[in-house]
Amino acid sequence: MSRILVVEDESAIAELISINLRHAGFEVTLAGSATQAQYEVDRVLPDLVVLDWMLPGQSGVALARQWRGAARTKELPIIMLTARAEEGDKIAGLDAGADDYVTKPFSTNELLARIRAVLRRKAPEALDSAVEIGPLLLDPGTRRVSRDGVEVKLGPTEFRLLHFLMTHPERVHSRSQLLDRVWGDHVFIEERTIDVHVKRLREALERVQCARMIETVRGAGYRLTQQSSALSA
């Protein structure tokens, strides 16, 4: 379930967005100020932020710039939602680091569509769509992984790890990156724990001859490949 942080100081609008997001299957946290938003981001990094421009204290644009300038939040997906509709405002919001810009009044259906579009581009593992890479099929909705109809039994951590790798195929991920994106940056475990879970994942995939899809890149980390050489009949 994707975590969405809604930063909006008008309670009626915040509640409207929250209700619609929850009905669509998202987990929602509300913040009414930049200070509260920063607290929530420090506590648990969300999958996406819906950010108002006009906030008590610090503006949403200033907050977006702050997040883009920090290593931990530089890739955080942000959608500006504001009544400021002038072209110059849109340019300022996008230049500050927003991935999309929605003006008020707004359609909740359009906002949901834009949230899904940004997540598809920047955090595909946050969506519940089925993923198919090579012969492997992973369905987050049913939490099942299979090859040609043969189910692969995975523990919850190995499932999350495989989901992330399958939504970012052919890319090398360091242990620290996997720790942040799969376990969450608020969880404190040693990086070598990653190796244990990769080993368990390979053992499970070996039953359907897909273990070699998980490659170790010496000195760099791990990646999932769909090259035919990684597959056994």
Image (cartoon, rainbow, N blue to C red):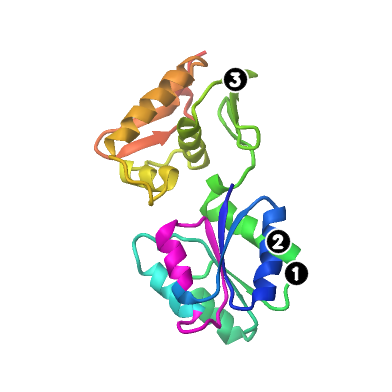
- Secondary structure found at label 2: helix
Image height check: is 52 above or below 148? Answer: below
From the image, tell me which residue sits under label 3: 151
In what element is the residue under mark 1?
loop
Amino acid type, callout 1: Ser
Alpha carbons under labels 3 and 1: distance apart: 41 Å
Q: Position of residue 44 (x, y in %)?
A: 44, 56
Q: Magenta stretch?
A: 36-59
Q: What residue sits 53% from the left and 77% below the top? A: 93
The correct choice, above or below, for 157 with respect to 38 in the image is above
> Which residue corresponds to the image point at 40% horizontal and 23% vertical from the top-left?
200
Location of residue 142 by image quarter: top right
Magenta stretch contains residue 39: yes
Q: Position of residue 224 (x, y in %)?
A: 44, 33
How far across and down, in percent of the image, does residue 80 sit?
57, 72
The residue under the point 70% across, 61% down is 19
- Residue type at mark 2: give it: Ile
In the rendered structure, the answer to whether residue 146 lies left or right of residue 107 reads left
Residue labelled with disc 1: 107
Question: Which residue is denoted by mark 2 in the rendering?
Answer: 19
Q: Residue 87 falls in which quadrant of the image?
A: bottom right
Does 153 sit left or right of 182 as displayed? Answer: right
Three-letter code for the amino acid on which mark 3 is drawn: Glu
